[in-house]
Image (cartoon, rainbow, N blue to C red):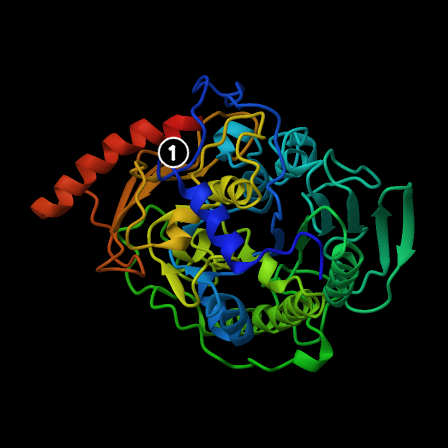
Amino acid sequence: MSRHHLSLGSLVLLLAGLLAGSPSALPAAVSQTKGEPYEASGPAQAVPNSPNVVVVLVDDARYDDLATLPVIKSRIGATGATLTDFYAPFPLCCPSRATLLTGQYAHNHGVLANEAPLGGFSGFDDSSTLATWLTPTYTTGLIGKYLNQYQVPYKPPGWDEWMVPRGTYDYLNEAWSINTASRPSNKRYPGYQTDTMGQLAESFIRRHASDRDPFFLYTSIVAPHAGNPADPQDPAGFPTPFVKPEYRNVFEGRAITDRSFNEADVGDKPVRPSPIRPAEIAGLTEANAQRREALLSAQDATVQILDTLRDTGELDNTFVFFMSDNGYILGEHRIRGGKVAPYEVSNRVPMLVRGPGIAPGTVVDQVTSQVDFAPTVLAMTGNLGANDTPIDGINLIPFLQDPNSARTSREAVVLEAGPESSTTTRYRYQGVRSGQWKYVERQGGQEELYDLRGDPYELENVAARPGFGQTPVQRQAQTRLDVLLDRYRWCAGAKCR
């Protein structure tokens, strides 16, 4: 057992201290202007007996994919907390990953696409992230995917150990770039990439379990994102991951059950694709099956991490997150694929966490966001104030401790998608989620309003449209959310909270 193991009494005292003060437990900002840091009371100090933090991030998993991951639900959600309304503000790989590491919306961190010139690896300023804020009080490690177009052997600031596959989307690629305390090196790990990530995570935990410093491990698994090699069962026109042979056909033929799949009437939507043909339905059904089959290997890797934490005596002293960068559309609202859309299957993502002080079976149904992840980790590790850039999110520890009584002054979370090309500054859409309502304004001026309590599948856009009336409740909601959107669409730092 490591020397930073916490007793239950110490955990209670530590979390009580973190919860003291305002619900967000965040330091006051010197300025609310982007680029200016929070005021800190002094250098970041390690909290005595600090807990570890381990993150398992999967790629493109939807919230409803959790239904096929029973072990994740039982060993993280049932023993900790499930956040049922957790949002990816900009549902695309690079913007989401930059948000997780900075606590900022994309309109502040500036990563607005997966590729240059609007984003990707080259568009991300990683000089100030969770990794740098946790260093030197934490040993930090990243395993797996970073950002699209990443170039080896670069190791960003703050990371002590850096282990990335040279072929991000090659599920059987054996070549890895390993950059640790000495120098970059190339290694070969035969086998399935997700399995390799589980093995590397186990090695990291075992090597650092008895260290004086606690650790922060970010394991970024590419499943269920599409990748190579191809398989004879792959449906034409619908990208799929490569499934480990033992899991092939586990979910074959299972229909997509989201009620918005091949929506009967999309006349209320700004985008109105044609009905999905039977052959396309078969292709989407197979793509969905393969995605979920690939996730079973991610579940195995997560179990390997949990078992290693238990075997090393670290499990009770570790916060373990399981989450996704964004969702994925598989025929909902007749959209054949992709993710950059303001719909639940795209921007509502899995988020489960277990760890010290979180009661088993906790359910957080308040609206939360990926901008909240970084400040929550800073609070968990006793590093609030260590960040040298403004953070847009809130500390979620009060919600994890007592979701029924936790409060925040934040009235909405932002939903956004940046410009489609470098020739325009107009965002594809900007919106807010507030309470039961979601409101979105498209770049062409179209508006969407959904009552997610009464219409969770977003089948009826109740925004005011010519020839369609609104109930007084809907009209009042749209008026209120229109004001909120103007307030939050370009918010930064404290103005987002």
- Along the horizontal axis of the image, is 247 left or right of 430? right
Q: Residue 225's spot in the image, x, y percent?
A: 62, 59
Task: State the residue at coordinates (70%, 70%).
Answer: 311
* Total count of labels: 1
Image quarter in which the C terminus is found: top left
Above or below for 483 versus 298: above
| Residue nearest the viewer, comparing 77 with 342 | 77
Where residue 96 sits: x, y (%)? 54, 44
Residue furthest out toward the left: 472
Residue 171, given in percent of the width and then of the height, sits at 75, 63
Q: Is residue 238 left or right of residue 362?
A: right
| Front residue of 39 and 369 | 39
Does the image show residue 72?
A: yes
Instruction: Identify the residue at horizontal 62%, vertical 38% (top origin).
Output: 130
Q: Quadrant of residue 60?
A: bottom right
Looking at the image, residue 269 lies above or below residue 330: above
Q: Secondary structure at mark 1?
A: loop
Neighbourhood count class around disc 1 (C-alpha, 10 Å): few under 14, some 14–19, many 20 upward: some
Which residue type does callout 1 highlight? Gln
Residue at x 47% of width, y 66% of height: 77
Report which residue position mark 1 lands on: 443
- Comparing 73 with 41, the one in front is 41
Q: Can you say which quadrant of the picture contains the N terminus?
A: bottom right
